[in-house]
């Protein structure tokens, strides 16, 4: 292609934590799937940057529109109507949906407002909700990130990786 | 997060071509979906790096395993058995599947060997098959990229963007 830049890239520092996540998943016979909205596939792209990720990563959904969240993940229309796509109830339903549809043991859902548009007083740009599913437990977390669209999306992926890593270490520390 | 690097990123040069792709799609009332294997969501992540991409991008699948290609996209087991996941027939079936399952007017499928493992004499590391679906036409293309895993994946996304852009311009040049 003659290009001197990387069209899409995953930082080598991040590949280290992904390698550790992969080791924890593999050692415990777990697989992971994602249901991504604002990060648009960035978390799946990060996971698969590591060789051997096919041992613990099989599939993932990018559900960008509300319709996709309903059709692919089974999010109820009432959740989207009453709470919106960027909400605790939505990421909870998304992560339940991804686990159910894919049979993965571990799931991550991400829905947020990357900007520059779409923010409000109640949900400013940078607001991102995360859902984590691990062995039938679901945890939801909200973060508000500073920065532009690219930065919010990158920080959201970084947060998901760190949270997932720490949770796996806590629950499966015997593995490594 | 205190990070000084981007966990995942899309080059600003690439965002220019994505913006043009988005304009072409929007002007013609088209939506796009991807079925990604070796790029693992990188193309969807690239598309959604542009604000307003929700006008033309609704959903996407990362089908990394053979099972996911069968279950989510309807790829026949015989295709995977006889031709393998990295083949013309597989990307053809993948892009047919993504168009059918999502209702998108435009589809892109990518399946390749990013390495470092998985290569053979017949299919060396860097071999990537692409399927493009546009208004009931399907085109398949094979490329062999040099470089490491990150580079192959980045080049594959760059190739898909350029090919898609050129094809849209050729078929919908009246739009801009």
Image: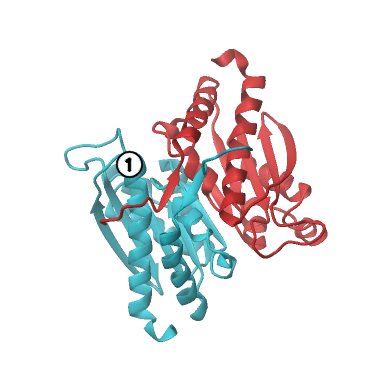
Chain colours: A red, B cyan
Q: Give percent across and percent down for residue B122.
A: 18, 42
Figure disc tally: 1
Please say if A135 is above or below A35.
Answer: above
Could you say which is closer to the camera, residue B25 or residue B18?
B18
Give above or below for B150 relative to B169: above
A166 to the left or right of B87: right
Instruction: Kindly identify the residue that appears in the image at 50 percent across and 35 percent down.
Output: A14
Helix, strand or loop at disc 1? loop
Q: Quadrant of the C terminus of chain A?
A: top right
Q: Quadrant of the N terminus of chain A?
A: bottom left
Quarter holding residue A103: top right
Task: Tell me the crowding category of disc 1: few under 14, some 14 to 19, or many 20 or more residues within 10 angstroms, Cα based.
Answer: many
**Hey, which residue is sitting farthest top in the picture?**
A174
Between B97 and B130, the one nearer to me in the picture: B130
Give how far across and how far down residue B173 sits, in percent.
37, 83
Return the chain for callout 1.
B
- Image coordinates of residue A95 in percent, x first then y, are 67, 43
Using the image, determine if residue A98 lies above or below residue A30: below
| Residue A9 in view here | yes
Residue A115 drawn at (x, y percent):
65, 60
**Relative vertical location of residue A132 with respect to residue A74 in this rendering, above or below:** above
The image quarter containing residue B114 is top left
Residue placed at 44% from the left, 66% from the top?
A: B16
Q: Which residue is mark 1?
A: B114
| Residue at 52%, 44% in the rendered image | B6
Residue A58 shows in the view: no
Position of residue A73 in the picture relative to residue A61 (left or right): right
């Amino acid at each position: 292609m003659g290009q001197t830049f990387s069209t899409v890239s995953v930082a080598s520092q991040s590949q280290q934590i992904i390698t550790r996540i992969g080791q924890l998943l593999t050692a415990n016979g777990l697989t992971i799937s994602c249901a991504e909205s604002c990060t648009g596939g960035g978390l799946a792209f990060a996971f698969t940057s590591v060789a051997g990720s096919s041992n613990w990563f099989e599939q993932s959904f990018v559900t960008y529109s509300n319709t996709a969240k309903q059709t692919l993940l089974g999010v109820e229309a009432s959740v989207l109507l009453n709470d919106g796509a960027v909400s605790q109830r939505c990421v909870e339903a998304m992560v339940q949906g991804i686990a159910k549809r894919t049979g993965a043991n571990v799931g991550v859902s991400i829905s947020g407002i990357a900007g520059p548009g779409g923010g409000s007083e109640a949900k400013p740009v940078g607001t991102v909700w995360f859902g984590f599913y691990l062995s039938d437990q679901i945890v939801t977390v909200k973060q508000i990130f500073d920065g532009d669209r690219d930065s919010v999306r990158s920080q959201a992926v970084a947060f998901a990786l760190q949270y997932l890593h720490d949770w796996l270490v806590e629950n499966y520390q015997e593995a490594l």
